[in-house]
């Protein structure tokens, strides 16, 4: 009915309150007449929609939402014309995007400061070395094998965390080493891997500029996040001549 309604599922992070009818007590299935399978399924659909809107921070009037559902499903004429719907949804998108950008900017500034403070203190610790680019590393176990080149493919075990210890990715937890070309990972990895002999296990402390910068990645890695990886270089696969 309204194509732009897809923004409800993609514009997360806005700080707008969700309106609720009566959040004091959840009604039981029997009290609101959910004995039949059709009614239970209907309730589940409504619950899922509500949860998504709440997670996205979208302000909703439940009476208007229900009216829209009923009109659409019954084939009744829409109470808003196409131009009005288009204008309203465009304004809604702009408001949500502005809120999301503001939130991302604030989070990015906070992460940048935390990262800078951490790296400044970490650089003073015994055993931590800092390269010209700002990458920091600590040797946990020294290897004696060859060092990979940017054109090589490597096999590694890794464990990645944020500064607060949140694990965002780990081949160790997956119990399966990862294999990939050196040149196709974040800059901090590209540089660090080429310093490591095979058989080594190092800890990388990667500034955001050598990671995902202001864009972040996925749900856990926010903008300007400093990342920590424990990396074990298991082997090198030479590129074919």
Image: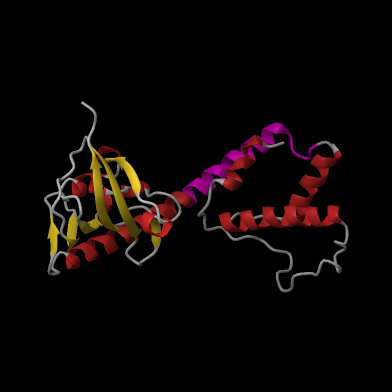
Place residue 123 in its image quadrant.
Answer: bottom left
Q: Which residues are magenta?
A: 78-99
**Image quarter in which the C terminus is found:** top left
Q: Position of residue 45 (x, y in %)?
A: 73, 52
Q: Nearer the viewer, residue 59 or 150?
A: 150
- Above or below, 193 against 31 in this view is above
Total labels drawn: 0
**Image quarter in which the N terminus is found:** top right
Identify the residue shown where x is 19% and y is 50%: 198
186 on left or right of 34: left
- Above or below, 18 against 69 in this view is below
- Check if residue 205 falls in the magenta segment: no
Place residue 202 in its image quadrant.
Answer: bottom left
Q: Position of residue 131 (x, y in %)?
A: 12, 53
16 on left or right of 239: right
- Above or below, 181 against 178 in this view is above
Q: Position of residue 34 (x, y in %)?
A: 85, 61
Majority SS type along the magenta span: helix
202 on left or right of 94: left
Q: Nearer the viewer, residue 209 or 199?
A: 199
Q: Residue furthest bottom?
A: 24
């Amino acid at each position: 009915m309204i194509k732009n309604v897809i923004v409800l599922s993609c514009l997360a992070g806005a700080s707008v309150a969700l309106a609720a009818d009566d959040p004091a007590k959840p009604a039981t299935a029997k009290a609101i007449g959910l004995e039949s399978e059709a009614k239970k399924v209907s309730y589940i659909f409504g619950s899922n929609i509500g949860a998504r809107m709440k997670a996205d921070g979208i302000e909703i009037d439940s009476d208007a939402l229900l009216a829209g559902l009923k009109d659409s499903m019954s084939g009744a004429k829409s109470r808003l014309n196409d131009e009005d719907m288009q204008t309203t949804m465009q304004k809604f998108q702009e408001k949500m995007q502005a809120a999301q950008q503001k939130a991302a900017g604030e989070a990015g500034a906070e992460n940048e400061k935390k990262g800078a403070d951490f790296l400044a203190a970490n650089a003073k610790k015994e055993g931590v070395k800092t390269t010209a680019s700002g990458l920091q590393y600590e040797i946990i176990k020294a290897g004696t094998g060859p060092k990979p080149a940017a054109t090589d493919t490597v096999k590694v075990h890794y464990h990645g965390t944020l500064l607060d210890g949140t694990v965002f990715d780990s081949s160790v937890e997956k119990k399966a080493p990862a294999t990939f070309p050196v040149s196709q990972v974040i800059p901090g990895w590209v540089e660090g891997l080429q310093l490591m002999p095979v058989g080594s296990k190092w800890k990388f402390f990667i500034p955001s500029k050598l990671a995902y910068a202001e864009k972040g990645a996925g749900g856990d890695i926010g903008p300007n996040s400093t990342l920590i990886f424990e990396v074990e270089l298991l082997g090198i696969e030479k590129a074919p001549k």
